[in-house]
Image: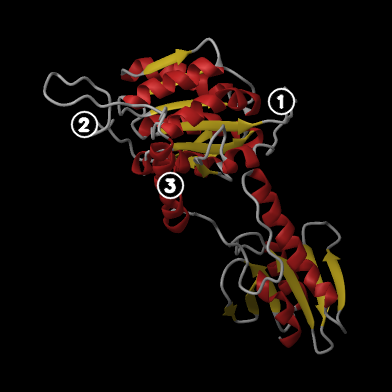
Amino acid sequence: MQEKVLMKGNEAIAEAAILAGCRHYLGYPITPQTEVAAYMAKKMPKIGGTFLQAESEIAAINMVYGVAATGKRAMTSSSSPGIALKCEGISYLAGADLPAVIVNVQRGGPGLGGIQPSQSDYFLATRGPGHGDFHVLVLAPASVQEMADLTGKAFDLAEKYRMPAMLLADGTMGQMMEPVQLPEPRDPDTTEKDWAVTGTKCQRKHHVVNSLYLSPAELERLNIERFERYAEIEKNECMWEAFMMEDAEVCIVSCGITARVSRNAIVEARKQQLKTIEDLDIYYYTNDRGSCEIDFVVDTGKRIVPVEVKAEVNLRAKSLKTYQEKFSPEVSVRTSMADYKKEERLVNLPLYAIDQIIKL
Protein backbone atom coordinates (compact mmCIF):
# COMPACT_ATOMS: atom_id res chain seq x y z
CA MET A 1 0.00 0.00 0.00
CA GLN A 2 1.08 3.57 -0.62
CA GLU A 3 1.55 6.34 1.94
CA LYS A 4 -1.53 8.16 3.16
CA VAL A 5 -2.51 11.33 1.32
CA LEU A 6 -5.24 13.88 1.94
CA MET A 7 -7.81 13.65 -0.85
CA LYS A 8 -11.34 14.71 -1.65
CA GLY A 9 -13.68 11.74 -2.03
CA ASN A 10 -14.40 12.34 -5.71
CA GLU A 11 -10.69 12.57 -6.49
CA ALA A 12 -10.00 9.38 -4.52
CA ILE A 13 -12.52 7.52 -6.72
CA ALA A 14 -10.85 8.79 -9.89
CA GLU A 15 -7.32 7.95 -8.76
CA ALA A 16 -8.37 4.53 -7.48
CA ALA A 17 -9.97 3.77 -10.87
CA ILE A 18 -6.72 4.63 -12.63
CA LEU A 19 -4.73 2.50 -10.18
CA ALA A 20 -7.16 -0.37 -10.87
CA GLY A 21 -6.24 -0.28 -14.56
CA CYS A 22 -9.07 1.84 -15.92
CA ARG A 23 -7.93 3.82 -18.95
CA HIS A 24 -11.30 4.89 -20.36
CA TYR A 25 -13.49 7.47 -18.66
CA LEU A 26 -16.60 8.77 -20.43
CA GLY A 27 -18.73 11.29 -18.58
CA TYR A 28 -20.63 14.52 -18.35
CA PRO A 29 -20.32 17.17 -15.60
CA ILE A 30 -22.92 17.52 -12.86
CA THR A 31 -22.68 18.70 -9.25
CA PRO A 32 -21.61 17.22 -6.82
CA GLN A 33 -19.46 14.73 -8.78
CA THR A 34 -17.75 17.01 -11.29
CA GLU A 35 -14.35 16.59 -9.60
CA VAL A 36 -14.29 12.97 -10.80
CA ALA A 37 -14.43 14.13 -14.41
CA ALA A 38 -12.05 17.04 -13.79
CA TYR A 39 -9.47 14.71 -12.25
CA MET A 40 -9.76 12.27 -15.13
CA ALA A 41 -9.42 15.10 -17.64
CA LYS A 42 -6.03 15.95 -16.11
CA LYS A 43 -4.68 12.45 -15.55
CA MET A 44 -5.91 10.28 -18.44
CA PRO A 45 -3.97 12.03 -21.25
CA LYS A 46 -0.76 11.76 -19.19
CA ILE A 47 -1.02 7.96 -18.89
CA GLY A 48 -2.19 7.16 -22.40
CA GLY A 49 -5.81 6.84 -21.37
CA THR A 50 -8.99 8.26 -22.82
CA PHE A 51 -11.04 11.05 -21.27
CA LEU A 52 -14.09 12.10 -23.20
CA GLN A 53 -16.73 14.58 -22.11
CA ALA A 54 -19.78 13.44 -24.01
CA GLU A 55 -22.59 15.69 -25.18
CA SER A 56 -24.95 14.18 -22.60
CA GLU A 57 -25.27 11.51 -19.94
CA ILE A 58 -27.03 9.27 -22.45
CA ALA A 59 -24.13 9.54 -24.87
CA ALA A 60 -21.62 8.85 -22.08
CA ILE A 61 -23.21 5.58 -20.93
CA ASN A 62 -23.47 4.31 -24.50
CA MET A 63 -19.79 5.09 -25.02
CA VAL A 64 -19.09 3.02 -21.91
CA TYR A 65 -21.06 0.21 -23.56
CA GLY A 66 -18.82 0.42 -26.59
CA VAL A 67 -15.58 0.32 -24.59
CA ALA A 68 -16.84 -2.46 -22.32
CA ALA A 69 -17.71 -4.56 -25.39
CA THR A 70 -14.00 -4.64 -26.26
CA GLY A 71 -13.12 -6.08 -22.83
CA LYS A 72 -11.47 -2.89 -21.54
CA ARG A 73 -12.20 -1.33 -18.15
CA ALA A 74 -14.51 1.65 -18.54
CA MET A 75 -16.09 4.02 -16.04
CA THR A 76 -18.59 6.83 -16.00
CA SER A 77 -19.80 9.00 -13.14
CA SER A 78 -22.75 11.27 -12.48
CA SER A 79 -25.19 12.36 -9.83
CA SER A 80 -28.81 11.38 -9.30
CA PRO A 81 -30.66 13.03 -12.24
CA GLY A 82 -27.74 12.19 -14.50
CA ILE A 83 -27.88 8.56 -13.38
CA ALA A 84 -31.59 8.53 -14.25
CA LEU A 85 -30.66 9.50 -17.81
CA LYS A 86 -28.11 6.67 -17.93
CA CYS A 87 -30.58 3.99 -16.82
CA GLU A 88 -31.46 2.80 -20.33
CA GLY A 89 -27.78 2.33 -21.12
CA ILE A 90 -27.18 0.54 -17.81
CA SER A 91 -29.99 -1.86 -18.70
CA TYR A 92 -28.35 -2.46 -22.09
CA LEU A 93 -25.03 -3.21 -20.33
CA ALA A 94 -26.78 -5.72 -18.07
CA GLY A 95 -28.64 -7.24 -21.02
CA ALA A 96 -25.38 -7.69 -22.94
CA ASP A 97 -23.54 -9.05 -19.86
CA LEU A 98 -20.91 -6.31 -20.01
CA PRO A 99 -18.76 -5.23 -17.04
CA ALA A 100 -18.51 -1.50 -16.32
CA VAL A 101 -18.40 0.82 -13.32
CA ILE A 102 -20.96 3.57 -12.79
CA VAL A 103 -20.32 6.08 -9.99
CA ASN A 104 -23.33 7.81 -8.44
CA VAL A 105 -22.48 10.71 -6.11
CA GLN A 106 -26.05 11.24 -4.96
CA ARG A 107 -27.88 14.53 -4.57
CA GLY A 108 -31.45 15.43 -3.65
CA GLY A 109 -34.48 14.91 -5.86
CA PRO A 110 -36.92 14.16 -7.42
CA GLY A 111 -36.52 16.01 -10.69
CA LEU A 112 -33.52 18.30 -10.76
CA GLY A 113 -33.94 18.56 -7.00
CA GLY A 114 -30.98 20.35 -5.48
CA ILE A 115 -27.22 20.02 -5.22
CA GLN A 116 -27.27 19.12 -1.53
CA PRO A 117 -26.15 15.59 -0.54
CA SER A 118 -28.78 12.87 -0.43
CA GLN A 119 -29.26 9.11 -0.36
CA SER A 120 -32.47 9.08 -2.37
CA ASP A 121 -31.21 6.63 -5.01
CA TYR A 122 -31.01 3.57 -2.77
CA PHE A 123 -34.01 1.86 -4.35
CA LEU A 124 -32.96 2.82 -7.86
CA ALA A 125 -29.53 1.24 -7.31
CA THR A 126 -30.52 -1.89 -5.43
CA ARG A 127 -33.69 -2.79 -7.34
CA GLY A 128 -32.28 -2.36 -10.83
CA PRO A 129 -31.48 1.05 -12.39
CA GLY A 130 -33.38 0.59 -15.61
CA HIS A 131 -36.09 -1.46 -17.34
CA GLY A 132 -36.23 -5.26 -17.34
CA ASP A 133 -35.28 -8.10 -15.03
CA PHE A 134 -31.78 -7.26 -13.83
CA HIS A 135 -29.64 -6.05 -10.96
CA VAL A 136 -26.29 -4.35 -10.71
CA LEU A 137 -23.58 -4.84 -8.14
CA VAL A 138 -23.87 -2.03 -5.58
CA LEU A 139 -21.03 -0.94 -3.30
CA ALA A 140 -21.76 1.83 -0.78
CA PRO A 141 -18.69 3.41 0.86
CA ALA A 142 -18.85 5.23 4.20
CA SER A 143 -15.48 7.03 4.06
CA VAL A 144 -13.00 8.40 1.57
CA GLN A 145 -10.84 5.35 2.26
CA GLU A 146 -13.72 3.05 1.34
CA MET A 147 -14.41 5.13 -1.77
CA ALA A 148 -10.90 4.29 -2.94
CA ASP A 149 -10.97 0.65 -1.84
CA LEU A 150 -14.39 -0.13 -3.28
CA THR A 151 -13.67 1.46 -6.65
CA GLY A 152 -11.09 -1.21 -7.42
CA LYS A 153 -13.40 -3.83 -5.92
CA ALA A 154 -16.20 -2.67 -8.22
CA PHE A 155 -14.05 -3.24 -11.31
CA ASP A 156 -12.97 -6.68 -10.13
CA LEU A 157 -16.51 -7.86 -9.30
CA ALA A 158 -17.94 -6.41 -12.51
CA GLU A 159 -15.46 -8.45 -14.54
CA LYS A 160 -15.84 -11.56 -12.40
CA TYR A 161 -19.63 -11.67 -12.89
CA ARG A 162 -19.81 -9.84 -16.25
CA MET A 163 -22.27 -7.19 -15.14
CA PRO A 164 -22.35 -3.48 -14.31
CA ALA A 165 -21.29 -2.31 -10.85
CA MET A 166 -22.45 0.91 -9.20
CA LEU A 167 -20.44 2.78 -6.59
CA LEU A 168 -23.20 4.40 -4.54
CA ALA A 169 -21.63 7.42 -2.85
CA ASP A 170 -23.22 10.68 -1.75
CA GLY A 171 -22.45 14.36 -2.06
CA THR A 172 -21.06 14.69 1.46
CA MET A 173 -18.35 12.09 0.96
CA GLY A 174 -17.68 13.24 -2.58
CA GLN A 175 -16.79 16.71 -1.31
CA MET A 176 -15.17 15.90 2.03
CA MET A 177 -11.41 15.43 2.47
CA GLU A 178 -9.87 12.65 4.54
CA PRO A 179 -6.55 10.80 4.70
CA VAL A 180 -6.59 7.84 2.32
CA GLN A 181 -4.12 5.05 1.63
CA LEU A 182 -4.37 4.32 -2.06
CA PRO A 183 -3.88 0.79 -3.40
CA GLU A 184 -0.84 -0.27 -5.37
CA PRO A 185 -1.18 0.40 -9.12
CA ARG A 186 -2.19 -2.39 -11.47
CA ASP A 187 -1.46 -2.47 -15.17
CA PRO A 188 -4.48 -2.62 -17.51
CA ASP A 189 -5.53 -6.18 -18.25
CA THR A 190 -4.58 -6.99 -21.84
CA THR A 191 -5.69 -10.63 -21.87
CA GLU A 192 -8.11 -11.54 -24.64
CA LYS A 193 -11.66 -12.09 -23.38
CA ASP A 194 -13.51 -14.97 -25.02
CA TRP A 195 -16.53 -12.71 -25.52
CA ALA A 196 -14.96 -9.35 -26.35
CA VAL A 197 -15.42 -7.67 -29.71
CA THR A 198 -11.83 -7.01 -30.82
CA GLY A 199 -11.78 -8.14 -34.44
CA THR A 200 -11.39 -11.72 -35.64
CA LYS A 201 -8.21 -11.20 -37.67
CA CYS A 202 -9.78 -13.97 -39.76
CA GLN A 203 -8.69 -16.44 -37.06
CA ARG A 204 -11.88 -17.09 -35.11
CA LYS A 205 -15.65 -16.80 -35.22
CA HIS A 206 -17.26 -13.45 -34.62
CA HIS A 207 -18.08 -12.47 -31.04
CA VAL A 208 -21.51 -10.86 -30.82
CA VAL A 209 -22.41 -8.40 -28.06
CA ASN A 210 -26.15 -7.95 -27.97
CA SER A 211 -29.10 -7.40 -25.64
CA LEU A 212 -31.86 -8.16 -28.14
CA TYR A 213 -33.31 -11.68 -28.14
CA LEU A 214 -36.47 -12.16 -30.19
CA SER A 215 -36.96 -15.72 -29.01
CA PRO A 216 -38.93 -15.70 -25.73
CA ALA A 217 -37.32 -19.01 -24.71
CA GLU A 218 -33.80 -17.64 -25.26
CA LEU A 219 -34.55 -14.44 -23.34
CA GLU A 220 -36.03 -16.44 -20.47
CA ARG A 221 -32.99 -18.72 -20.39
CA LEU A 222 -30.60 -15.78 -20.17
CA ASN A 223 -32.63 -14.06 -17.45
CA ILE A 224 -32.70 -17.26 -15.40
CA GLU A 225 -28.94 -17.59 -15.83
CA ARG A 226 -28.44 -13.99 -14.65
CA PHE A 227 -30.57 -14.51 -11.56
CA GLU A 228 -28.53 -17.61 -10.73
CA ARG A 229 -25.50 -15.32 -10.92
CA TYR A 230 -27.22 -12.79 -8.65
CA ALA A 231 -27.91 -15.54 -6.11
CA GLU A 232 -24.24 -16.49 -6.17
CA ILE A 233 -23.29 -12.87 -5.54
CA GLU A 234 -25.74 -12.61 -2.66
CA LYS A 235 -24.23 -15.75 -1.16
CA ASN A 236 -20.54 -14.97 -1.63
CA GLU A 237 -19.97 -11.25 -2.13
CA CYS A 238 -22.09 -9.36 0.40
CA MET A 239 -19.97 -7.08 2.57
CA TRP A 240 -20.91 -5.32 5.77
CA GLU A 241 -19.36 -4.04 8.98
CA ALA A 242 -20.93 -4.97 12.32
CA PHE A 243 -20.72 -2.39 15.09
CA MET A 244 -21.53 -3.29 18.71
CA MET A 245 -23.86 -6.11 17.72
CA GLU A 246 -22.76 -8.55 20.45
CA ASP A 247 -25.75 -7.96 22.74
CA ALA A 248 -27.86 -5.58 20.63
CA GLU A 249 -31.65 -5.78 20.76
CA VAL A 250 -32.08 -3.10 18.07
CA CYS A 251 -30.09 -3.11 14.82
CA ILE A 252 -29.61 0.06 12.77
CA VAL A 253 -28.79 -0.59 9.10
CA SER A 254 -27.31 2.29 7.14
CA CYS A 255 -24.75 3.09 4.45
CA GLY A 256 -22.70 6.02 3.27
CA ILE A 257 -22.38 9.13 5.42
CA THR A 258 -25.42 8.15 7.53
CA ALA A 259 -23.53 5.03 8.66
CA ARG A 260 -21.08 7.32 10.41
CA VAL A 261 -23.89 9.30 12.01
CA SER A 262 -25.50 6.03 13.10
CA ARG A 263 -22.30 4.89 14.81
CA ASN A 264 -22.26 8.09 16.88
CA ALA A 265 -25.93 7.64 17.73
CA ILE A 266 -25.27 4.09 18.90
CA VAL A 267 -22.41 5.25 21.13
CA GLU A 268 -24.66 7.93 22.63
CA ALA A 269 -27.42 5.38 23.20
CA ARG A 270 -24.97 3.08 24.98
CA LYS A 271 -23.90 5.96 27.21
CA GLN A 272 -27.53 6.55 28.09
CA GLN A 273 -27.76 2.97 29.39
CA LEU A 274 -26.04 4.19 32.54
CA LYS A 275 -29.02 6.40 33.29
CA THR A 276 -31.43 3.46 33.10
CA ILE A 277 -29.68 1.47 35.85
CA GLU A 278 -31.62 1.72 39.08
CA ASP A 279 -30.04 2.97 42.33
CA LEU A 280 -27.27 4.84 40.54
CA ASP A 281 -26.57 8.51 41.17
CA ILE A 282 -24.83 9.99 38.14
CA TYR A 283 -22.98 13.29 38.03
CA TYR A 284 -20.67 15.25 35.76
CA TYR A 285 -17.31 16.73 36.71
CA THR A 286 -15.21 19.61 35.40
CA ASN A 287 -12.44 21.46 37.20
CA ASP A 288 -12.34 25.22 37.67
CA ARG A 289 -10.14 25.80 34.63
CA GLY A 290 -12.22 23.57 32.35
CA SER A 291 -9.15 21.54 31.45
CA CYS A 292 -10.54 18.34 32.99
CA GLU A 293 -13.98 17.03 32.05
CA ILE A 294 -15.34 13.64 33.12
CA ASP A 295 -18.38 12.37 31.19
CA PHE A 296 -19.93 10.57 34.16
CA VAL A 297 -19.16 10.36 37.86
CA VAL A 298 -21.15 7.41 39.18
CA ASP A 299 -22.06 6.73 42.81
CA THR A 300 -22.61 2.96 42.92
CA GLY A 301 -23.38 2.98 46.63
CA LYS A 302 -20.03 1.33 47.33
CA ARG A 303 -17.69 3.83 45.72
CA ILE A 304 -17.40 6.82 43.40
CA VAL A 305 -16.41 5.77 39.88
CA PRO A 306 -15.31 8.31 37.26
CA VAL A 307 -16.21 7.24 33.72
CA GLU A 308 -14.74 8.66 30.52
CA VAL A 309 -16.34 7.62 27.22
CA LYS A 310 -13.97 7.38 24.23
CA ALA A 311 -14.77 6.92 20.56
CA GLU A 312 -13.65 3.91 18.53
CA VAL A 313 -10.56 2.25 20.09
CA ASN A 314 -9.14 5.51 21.44
CA LEU A 315 -7.44 4.72 24.75
CA ARG A 316 -6.19 8.20 25.62
CA ALA A 317 -7.80 9.52 28.78
CA LYS A 318 -6.05 12.75 29.81
CA SER A 319 -8.96 14.10 31.86
CA LEU A 320 -9.34 10.79 33.66
CA LYS A 321 -5.67 10.82 34.68
CA THR A 322 -6.04 14.39 35.98
CA TYR A 323 -9.07 13.32 38.03
CA GLN A 324 -7.18 10.31 39.41
CA GLU A 325 -4.26 12.47 40.51
CA LYS A 326 -6.57 14.84 42.40
CA PHE A 327 -9.10 12.45 43.98
CA SER A 328 -7.39 9.01 43.94
CA PRO A 329 -10.56 6.95 43.27
CA GLU A 330 -10.37 3.21 44.00
CA VAL A 331 -11.27 2.45 40.40
CA SER A 332 -11.70 4.48 37.23
CA VAL A 333 -13.45 3.40 34.03
CA ARG A 334 -12.69 4.18 30.39
CA THR A 335 -15.19 2.87 27.85
CA SER A 336 -14.31 2.43 24.18
CA MET A 337 -14.47 -0.08 21.35
CA ALA A 338 -11.30 -1.70 22.69
CA ASP A 339 -11.51 -5.02 24.57
CA TYR A 340 -11.74 -5.38 28.33
CA LYS A 341 -8.47 -4.48 30.02
CA LYS A 342 -7.46 -3.74 33.60
CA GLU A 343 -4.44 -1.63 34.49
CA GLU A 344 -3.98 -1.11 38.25
CA ARG A 345 -6.97 1.10 39.16
CA LEU A 346 -8.05 1.75 35.57
CA VAL A 347 -10.51 -0.56 33.80
CA ASN A 348 -11.28 -0.36 30.08
CA LEU A 349 -14.83 -1.58 29.44
CA PRO A 350 -16.18 -2.21 25.93
CA LEU A 351 -19.13 0.10 25.29
CA TYR A 352 -21.54 -2.82 25.08
CA ALA A 353 -20.66 -3.73 28.69
CA ILE A 354 -21.10 -0.25 30.16
CA ASP A 355 -23.90 -1.45 32.44
CA GLN A 356 -21.36 -3.63 34.28
CA ILE A 357 -19.98 -0.56 36.07
CA ILE A 358 -22.30 -1.27 38.96
CA LYS A 359 -20.38 -4.52 39.62
CA LEU A 360 -16.97 -2.86 39.95
Tell me which label, 3 or 1, sits earlier in the chain. Answer: 1
Tell me which label, 3 or 2, sits earlier in the chain. Answer: 2
Task: Tell me if residue 351 comes above or below residue 232 in the rendering.
Answer: below
Q: Which residue is mark 1?
A: 115
Q: Which mark is residue 224?
A: 3
Q: Residue at x 23, y 34 (%)?
A: 194
On screen, residue 346 versus residue 45, left or right, reads: right
Task: Tell me if residue 305 comes above or below residue 106 in the rendering.
Answer: below
On screen, residue 48 versus residue 256, left or right, reads: left
Amino acid type, callout 3: Ile
Crowding near the residue tagged with mark 2, few <14, some 14–19, many ≥20 C-alpha atoms within 10 Å = few
Q: Which residue is mark 2?
A: 192
Task: Give the camera-side residue of 261 and 360.
Answer: 261
Q: The residue tagged with tag 2: helix, strand or loop?
A: loop
State which quadrant residue 49 falls in: top left
Image coordinates for residue 276, horizontal then vertical, percent:
84, 75
Q: Is label 3 or label 2 in front? A: 3
Q: Residue at x 37, y 17 (%)?
A: 50
Image coordinates for residue 94, horizontal then vertical, percent:
45, 34
State the residue lying farthest toward the bottom: 302
Amino acid type, callout 1: Ile
Image coordinates for residue 10, horizontal then vertical, percent:
54, 30
State the residue lying farthest toward the left: 203
Q: Residue at x 46, y 20 (%)?
A: 62
